Amino acid sequence: MKKIAIVSLTACEGCQIALLDLGKRFFDFLDKVELVDFNLLEEKEFPKGKLDIVFVEGNPIRKEEIKILKSIRKQARLLVVIGNCAALGGIPEMKNYQNKKKTIRYIYKNVMKVPNPDIKEIDNFVKVDFTIPGCPINNEEFLKYVKILIKGKIPKIPEKPVCSECPYQGKEECFLRKNEPCLGPIIYAGCGAVCTKNEFPCYGCRGFLPNLNLQGFLKTLEKMKNKQEIDNNLEIFGLKDML
Amino acid sequence: MKLIIPHIHKTLGGTGFFSKISEKGEIKELRVTVLEGLRQIEGILIGRRIFETPLVISRICGICPTSHILNACRALEYALGIKVSEQTEALRRLITSAQIVQSHSAHLFFMSLADFFDIEDEKELNKKFSKESQAVLELRQFALRVISAIGGRTVHPITPRPGGFTKLPDKQALKDILKDYDQAEQAALMLVDLFQKIEYPKLKRKTRLASSYSEKDYPYHLGKQIKIGNEIFDPEGFFFNQVEEDLKTPPAKRVKYKGKTYMVGAIARIKNNNLEEKSYIQEFINKKNISEDDFFANNFYNSYCQAVEILHFIKEIKKEILDLEIKQDPYIEYTLRPGKGLGLLEAPRGILLSYLEVGKDGRIADCSIITPTAQYLNNLEEDLKILMKEIADFPKEKKIRRIKTLIRAYDPCIACAVH
């Protein structure tokens, strides 16, 4: 049986919960593998030696978390990051665009010893073999890609925009047609356009598609609002530093 | 002598335990340790826009994002002077009930139950309780389908916004979920029975139990009052005057009431309010041959209280779906203005207070979020000190097991306590 670990760094743990939310289907999957680490379900000691796939969720904020990352990288045949925080920095990365010395003082006015590093994506610390994107991950997509990963192969996420899954593509209800900034055209599909289907524009948690004229598209959006608004939009899910 | 548990699994976020005990058995130091970095969600929000604030706040926690997003919307509505429709309130009651059921059922069955049977992994647990495991998974799916139908998805719901929802659920889709109601109720009754039969460890320490309070019903949403011990406050009075944040042990927040520890969550809600299913508590008290005071002085019983609450809240779900009428607009539009708002909601783990201030520039000027775990961490440590005396003669392995059992019975969410 393939050895699998699901490791969480500093995070909301929503990607792990998304797996649990698969219910019986997640447990059926667990029957086919040897799950060596998954904080929510077991309490065995983290094993030594090689592991087939290690999934990592969250941000390394404490020094210990960077050590954990480096050590699991050595153990992992494949290291797969799950979720927007691990892949793109996520919500905590919004701090990077502020005066981070000031941001922490809103919470800890006088305490000086709280770790306050710039938030960086996991691939700044270790080599990443594959990314399952999203905030949270799409658990159906996890099941689909894990089947390929278990065979030791790297899946390929189709290079299609969110619009390709959006019911409003080309219709009057399209946010862009209503002059409301939506990142759908430049973001990886695979989420089922779950936000736009729920009348909420895409803020790009799954990351930019490659080989597109991003700047050109963003300029169009800036005309709908202004540069600061669009910049702020790109800060929510860690996209701004990817430009 | 030191007793250290570096990492306690099966809790939300990273938790550990540290204690130092003298040769005479005196506890010199004891603390629940935190293995989680500070994400600074409250600081990050300063200067940010109103529409994105609930979305950002929901990312505090992946197990109770529904509670966080709804309470952020509520705080903003108070700040902006919006009154939402009864339809919005009904949908919020419904999704909040479902949030409590999904969180409690995940905690009880997959994180806490194994402790009482010395089981270490999920496969063994599923083998020993195979029938129960299937039933609880389906019960949890019942609640998740409600969240998904209203919120758009289970983790980090999309639709809640200040003023209401971006999109309304399909009433028929909600009604269809009720086809599985009887099965869910059977599973809830099974959980109550299972957690009633458990032989809980002894623990006796009287503490202050705090929750939303109402004279007539079982409040969990749109709370108007908070009861702690025998005192009653409005949310503002409680938040501004009665409790204070202790920031001396970062990165976790810890909150005290007049310098003292207190407990929140299922056990506190049941103590302070009239739960329709209170007979199950009485039955438990009779069977265990304990007094009511004993019951509320032993936080191991919080697990049983969660089981009884699951039964209560799935009944709420049924009632709300049957009563639901969808005929109003999804949301009320707001205009930006300066203001302050404090939301009060019962999250699965207890009182959630979300305070937001909108500045003259129409952006967030202040943000403070007091989560349930931040409120009971100190109480947990005081309980652990009493427990350590009870288990002083236990062999080390058994001692560790017992400590973990109490910590897990509290159902802490360290991601929430730190954020």
Image (cartoon, coloured by chain):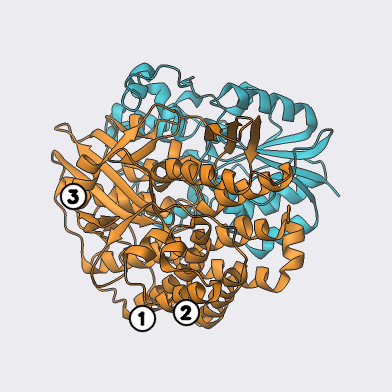
Chain colours: A cyan, B orange
Q: Find out whether the residues at labels 1 and 2 contact each other: C-beta distance under 8 Å.
A: yes
Residue B124 as seen in the image, left or right of residue B68: right
Residue type at tag 1: Leu
Residue type at tag 3: Tyr
In what element is the residue under mark 3?
helix
Residue drawn at 66 percent across, 56 percent down: B115
Name the residue carrying label 2.
B178
In what element is the residue under mark 2?
helix
Question: Observer-nearest residue: B25 or B82?
Answer: B25
Visible residue check, residue A172: no
Q: CA distance from mark 3 to mark 2?
A: 33 Å
Residue A99 image point, x, y percent: 35, 18
Q: Is residue A11 above or below residue B22?
A: below
Q: Is residue B191 above or below residue A238?
A: below
Chain of the residue under label 1? B
Query: Which label's residue is closer to the chain start, 1 or 2?
Result: 2
Name the residue carrying label 3.
B78
Q: CA distance from mark 1 to mark 2?
A: 9 Å
Mark 3, Cα crowd under 10 Å, few <14 / some 14-19 / many 20+, is: some
In what element is the residue under mark 1?
helix
Say which mark, if any, is on residue B322.
1
Say which mark, if any, is on residue B126.
none
